[in-house]
Image (cartoon, rainbow, N blue to C red):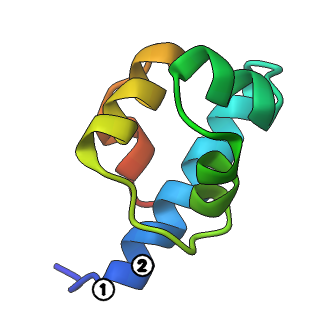
Amino acid sequence: MHTKTPADLRADLARNLRSIRLGKGLAQERLALDAGVDRTVVSKIERAVTNPSLEILLRLANHLEVDVADLLREA
């Protein structure tokens, strides 16, 4: 098993969130508004520059109708 770093996990999250969001045809602003988070938070997650809280991950996953694990899945 490969040992992951926090940077690896942020990169996986960034890639998965962006891919799922775009696959559903959502702009960052629409996802953020509907999920009840700030748009800058979505932007920072997608650029892998922040560690979102579990609450924010859950809000995003619920709105995107995916499991939190799908957001963190290794590419």
Q: Which residue is mark 2?
A: 8
Say which element carries label 2: helix
* Residue 55: x %, y % from top left: 28, 36
Q: At 39% across and 65% down in the image, what residue appears?
A: 51
Q: Amino acid at mark 1?
A: Thr
Q: Amino acid at mark 2?
A: Asp
Q: Which mark is residue 14?
A: none
Q: Are marks 2 and 1 in contact (CB under 8 Å)?
A: yes
* Quadrant of the frame with the N terminus: bottom left
Q: At 66% across and 22% down in the image, what residue appears?
A: 33
In the picture as drawn, the residue positioned furthest to the left comes out as 1
Q: Which residue is mark 1?
A: 5
Left or right: where does residue 42 sit relative to residue 5? right
Q: From the viewer's side, name the closer residue of 40 and 20.
A: 40
Q: At 47% across and 29% down in the image, what residue appears?
A: 60
* Residue 49: x %, y % from top left: 57, 75
Q: Is residue 33 above or below residue 43?
A: above
Q: Quadrant of residue 37?
A: top right
Residues packed near mark 2 inside 10 Å, few (<14), some (14 to 19) or many (20 plus) = some
* Residue 36: x %, y % from top left: 52, 23
